[in-house]
Amino acid sequence: MDHPVGPLHQIAITVAELERALPFYRDVLGLKFLFSAGPNLAFLSDGSVRFMLSTPQGAGQAGANSLLYFRVPEIDSSYAAITGRGATPERPPQMAAQMPITSSGSPLSAARRVI
């Protein structure tokens, strides 16, 4: 069976207050701080998986709706394969954020649409 998704790349965690959550993930858990993208969004890494901390957006609730992001070779065919297997999409793939590109292929090098 072909796998339409690749390795886990990012986990989105909804937090009530970014200014309180960031020190916990950075200082207590020891995740490497990568960058902030505004006052309600921060990115950290454990070296292979990126962690996106954000405050609730839309109908989201803190701690109740985390997202998993997978690298895929081609988003549209992966989306078609996943929905073809019975997944019910919340929405079509869309650009989540334009990420900084590095020459080393670090976790910052993803500019992807999410399913």
Image (cartoon, rainbow, N blue to C red):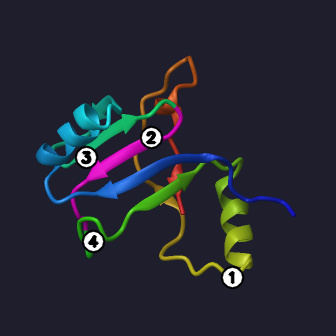
Is there CB contact under 8 Å for labels 2 and 3?
no
Q: Report how far apart the C-alphas of labels 4 and 3 lie in the structure.
A: 14 Å
The local secondary structure at tag 3 comes to strand
Q: Report how far apart the C-alphas of labels 1 and 3 lie in the structure.
A: 32 Å
**Residue where numbered disc 2 is placed:** 50
Whichever of labels 2 and 1 marks the residue nearer the N terminus, that label is 2
For the point 29% across and 49% down, which residue is it? 53
In this view, 18 is above or below 58: above
Q: Which residues are magenta?
A: 48-57
**Residue where numbered disc 3 is placed:** 41
Residue projecting furthest to the top = 103
**Residue where numbered disc 4 is placed:** 60
The local secondary structure at tag 2 comes to strand
Looking at the rendered structure, the kind of residue marked 3 is Leu
Q: Position of residue 15 (x, y in %)?
A: 23, 57
The quarter in which the C terminus is drawn is: bottom right
Is there CB contact under 8 Å for labels 1 and 3?
no
Whichever of labels 1 and 3 marks the residue nearer the N terminus, that label is 3
Q: Report how far apart the C-alphas of labels 4 and 2 lie in the structure.
A: 20 Å
Is there CB contact under 8 Å for labels 4 and 2?
no
Looking at the rendered structure, the kind of residue marked 4 is Gly
The quarter in which the N terminus is drawn is: bottom right
**Residue where numbered disc 1 is placed:** 86
